[in-house]
Image (cartoon, rainbow, N blue to C red):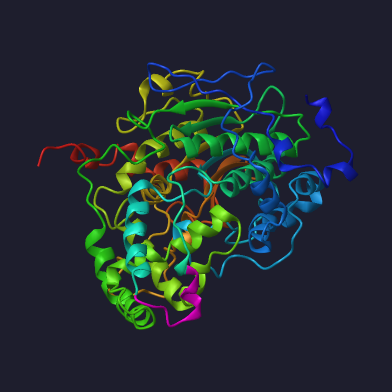
Amino acid sequence: MLNALKVSTRRSEKLPIDEFEHITHPISSHSQGYAPLPTGPGQSRSDTDLLEGDPDRKEKRRRFWPFFATLLALPCLLILWSSNHFCRTSKLTYQYPSNKDYSWAAYNPYFPVEGYPPPPIGCQIDQVCLIQRHGARFPTVDAAARIAGALSKLQSAEEYLDPKLDFLKSYTYSLGTDDLVPFGAMQSLQAGGESYVRYKHLISKKDLPFVRAASSKRVVKSARKWTQGFSLASHHVYNPSLSVIISEHGNCTLTNKMCPNAGEPSEQTDAWARIYGYPVAARLNLVAPGANLLPEDIPDLMPLCPFETVATEKKSPFCALFTKEEFQNYEYYMDLEKYYRTGYGQALGPVQGVGYVNELLARLTGMPVRDNTQTNRTLDSSPITFPLNHTIYADFSHDNELIAIYSAIGLFKQPEPLDPTKPNPGRTWVASHLVPFSGRMVTERLSCADRGKKYVRILVNDALQPLEFCGAGDGLCLLEAFVDSQEYARSDGAGDFEKCRLRK
């Protein structure tokens, strides 16, 4: 099969997306809540292939709206010089501006926040630990119910006095729930290819990336697409597999489901919704008399723009119903949601990232995991399910867990807690920069010949983090200093994890 896919350059420019789908790994159940997956030529084709579809979907993909092609093309353009085949076979050749100006918060498709900085002179990357959010998806079940409720109000209007609303006369809400959309699958494919191009010097056939995923279907599918993108970019020379799937119903460092006593962010988000949603609801009620929208309906209507756009691969008409400023205010609504759910604003937020941080420290130092929080000891004590001899590790997770990990490490600290009544325009806590669809944190370990020691640096969506808590604020820390700086994780959350399950 691999030989059949070694096509000429001319043919590769027309290679259909469906031909990417040749490296798949069947999930098996396991009593311990994880699934080590088979590797090798016997791997089977998935029967839930996201990038296959009916002729109508394939035709829509051929007309792929330039806005979305650009979102995927941008990283491809950045690495085109070293992976021309990967970009051509991905058909990501549209050229257009960055997506930095879109304020879709956690529903923003991935974009590099900054240009990737090469390692300092004299230093070479010798290990990479990646944790990545799944690609673009449908709304969750709960979010879909809220969206449908707000939408029904808008569609119950007596008439529409603005032509931008006319589409609602015949509109039917038809989005699915929870699952990865084809665009999200392509995001993960793209990310895998980019990882190969950037870190191919670390790879050999005996040392492929070790890949894990939380058990949600969209996370598993994203991990698989990443491995396929990695393989494609290497011209199928290096074919990593998804090795471990960790159940989200037990101990798991890739999800935030182990702290039932953690609070909700509703007090803060509701306060801001009443403030920013009031003029938006008033404006829409004027042009849709009888809709009787309330301020709290607005945060449920606005995500129809990004969700429909990523699902249909063309710009949703809902995007035109709101101004740029209104989307910026919506982004702040989600900034608050993340900050007060698993971020610094939630007393039991950062502790939900401690387990992963301790796994990260184990990989960086080559020492066994020491943790008494979220880690699955059965998995982490085995060299098969938690090896310490790889050069690239790739984990796949959710946005709320990434936020907890950032907070446990000490990234994106704000001078003051986020104010639920007024955004700070200078804040660095911006959801689209932290946890977009397919967002990622990469920890690089470096060997510096002239210094004779190991160093660490962290990039979030390609933005180098200053790491002022363990170095000079230039983004480079001695490995020992970084480990020492993670006292919160090394102490199992300084007593916070015990509070997660204490009876109130």
| 473 in magenta | no
Dividing the image into 4 quarters, which one contains the N terminus? top right
x%, y% of residue 364? 51, 35
Q: Quadrant of residue 113?
A: bottom right
Residue projecting furthest to the left: 504
Q: Give the residue displayed 47% in from the left and 63% down from the top.
A: 171
Left or right of 251: which side holds 204?
right
Q: Give the residue displayed 33% in from the left and 53% down from the top.
A: 145
Q: Give the residue displayed 33% in from the left and 29% down from the top.
A: 251
Q: Quadrant of residue 98?
A: bottom right
x%, y% of residue 417? 30, 65
424 versus 37 height, above or below? below
Instruction: Give the residues drawn in magenta, as a range.
Output: 158-167
Q: Is residue 416 visible to the viewer in this orientation of the structure?
A: no
Left or right of 203: which side holds 372?
left
| 164 in magenta | yes
Left or right of 86: which side holds 189?
left
Dividing the image into 4 quarters, which one contains the C terminus? top left
x%, y% of residue 114? 60, 61
Q: Is residue 140 visible to the viewer in this orientation of the structure?
A: yes
Residues 408 and 190: in front is 190
